[in-house]
Amino acid sequence: MAIQLEQVSFTYAEKSLWKQTALHDITLGIPKGLLTGIAGATGSGKSTLLQLFNGILKPTQGTVKVLDVTIRAGEKSPKLLPLRRRVGLVFQFPEQQMFEDTVEKDLIFGPLNFGMSPEEAKERARKAMLEMGLDLALLSRNPFRLSGGQMRKAAIASVLAMDPEIVVLDEPTATLDPVSRAELIAQLERLCREQGRTVIIVTHRMDELLPVADRWILLKDGKIAFQGSGGELAADPDILTRCGLGVPHSLRYWHAIAGQFGLAGERPRLTAESLAELIASLPGTVRSGNTAGMGDAHE
Amino acid sequence: MNERLLLGRSIETGSWVHKLDARSKLTGMLLYVAVILLSDSWLSMVLLAVFSITIMASTRIPLKYFIKAAKPLRYLMLFIFIVQLLSVKEGDVLWSAGSFSLHEGGLRLAAFSVIRMLFLITFTALLTFTTTPGKLNQGLEGILAPFKKLGLSPDRITLMISIALRFIPTILDESQIIMKAQASRGADLQELPLKEKARMLVSLLVPVISSAFRRAQDLVYSMEARGFRMDAPRSRYHRLRWGAADTVFVAMFIIMGVAVALL
């Protein structure tokens, strides 16, 4: 397992009148090399959970095991610098967290802190830019002069430049346009499939992550409501409603088609293309046009 | 939210002080400052302590929260104590070494200064602990209303204060997010040496200030889009009501002031 949480609770401002427990008795495991989605209604504890993964927050109860590092509540935590190099955490609206005057300086900030030479750090920066599909000419630009999508990708690249084994992202596609969102998800999937990194993504848009996520963790009121494979989630979409989440369009379409054609038990088709192909291949269905003409990615 | 920042956060307990009109609490606080300045004997300090602790206890807010409010200024209090102790050369000599000496008057003034400051901070925290920022602003506006005739704009002043109060936790939260992002990339302030710590804090300024300006701009547009005009007459969601308890509250401070002045 890349990450294991055992009976973890987290309370903000634990010793004050304003204490607020964000996570209750969480036990979960996130396997290495897979793409895991985390979803839950607003205030369900998703962002708090992510910050436990690289020791930014420490549990107030229970044990967090990340790779070979164990952080126990109430005990002095080990040196977290090596862990933070191995677990890259991209916060929500990462572009707001850029602070240097050029993209390159921002990208080499992490590698330099982790003891790399300036040449090596610059090489890492260039590699991370290419991984995120960004033009190297942007390296000399001021990060605040980039477009919204470019800035978001540059911010993610600043974490990738540290070459982390685990990449954790808090709503990376929020506020992006549909094309940029699809591109970003595809790039994050490549990081997982082609480079073997463990990728964990918190999202409110389950539709865009359902086709690519291997596993899902659903939170409700700071507790685990579901953890399992995408297939298990697709088989019981009511769990999403119970968590206060809407059932994604792709899942509703799949269930409608599966019910109509008796496909229960088949691998769910959660993209417009794969569903169209399946429908076209079913005996007795009439092809009335080109699937490329179907509305948006989910319709 | 920064849990250590207690000043400016209300704690609802439903006590009689919570229910008072914000104007009476503000008036009480102004009188309290005068009482503190008038207190210059140990007896008046004891009286002040009994009075302050009784009122603080009656708010049903644990006393440790009042003390915590003063904690951030402990070094300033220590500094004032040392400066007073060393600079005042009145009364009997308590200790001397060569030309250097400590006097009884210096010790007394140093102690009084620290006690006064401690009372001032802990007791005035009562105002913000028992009054929400909105009601506090409304109270301030009510108190400043007579100054309209002199060309002063209470609206403008209270708007500035309410926006400043509103943005303190937001800016603190944003700073914390950036610090967490920097810690994630290997620059944890808690683990850095002092020189690096200072450098990192300076690097925080750019994104925090630019974000504050962006928010201020958004706020102006949003207020204008909703028809806000400075000094335009507006109805109030909560109306201030001055009751008998408010008169009693203010009277207590006046009596206290007279008592301290007579001692």
Image (tube, rainbow, N blue to C red):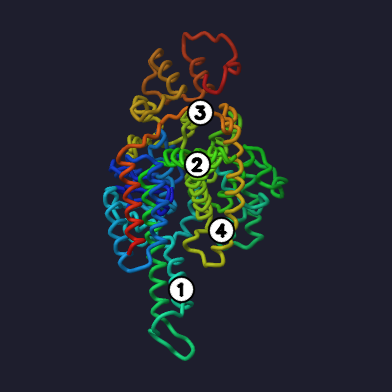
Q: Secondary structure at mark 1?
A: helix
Query: How far apart are the two marked residues, 3 and 2, measured between alpha carbons?
Result: 16 Å
Q: Mark 3 vs mark 2: which is more N-terminal? A: 2
In terms of image quadrants, where is residue B258?
Answer: bottom left
For disc 2, the neighbor class at 10 Å (few under 14, some 14 to 19, many from 20) is some
Query: How far apart are the two marked residues, 3 and 1, measured between alpha carbons?
Result: 50 Å
**Chain identifier of the residue bearing label 4 in the image:** B
**Chain identifier of the residue bearing label 1 in the image:** B
The residue lying toward the viewer, choosing from B56 and A74, is: B56
Which residue is at a point 57% across and 17% down the rendered structure image?
A: A295
Which residue is at a point 36% across and 61% down the rendered structure image?
A: B261
- Foreground disc of the pair 3, 2: 2
Q: Mark 3 vs mark 4: which is more N-terminal? A: 4
Quadrant where the C terminus of chain B sits is: bottom left
* Image coords of residue A227 (percent x, y): 35, 37
For disc 1, the neighbor class at 10 Å (few under 14, some 14 to 19, many from 20) is many
**Chain identifier of the residue bearing label 3 in the image:** B
The residue lying toward the viewer, choosing from A237 and B17, is: B17
On the picture, is B260 further left or further right than B233?
A: left
- Residue under label 2: B144
- Foreground disc of the pair 3, 4: 3
| Amino acid found under the numbered disc labelled 1 | Gln
Query: How far apart are the two marked residues, 4 and 2, measured between alpha carbons?
Result: 38 Å
**Chain identifier of the residue bearing label 2 in the image:** B
| Amino acid found under the numbered disc labelled 4 | Leu
On the picture, is A89 further left or further right than A129?
A: left
| Amino acid found under the numbered disc labelled 3 | Arg
* Image coords of residue A234 (percent x, y): 39, 27
Q: Mark 4 vs mark 2: which is more N-terminal? A: 2
Q: Are marks 4 and 2 in contact (CB under 8 Å)?
A: no
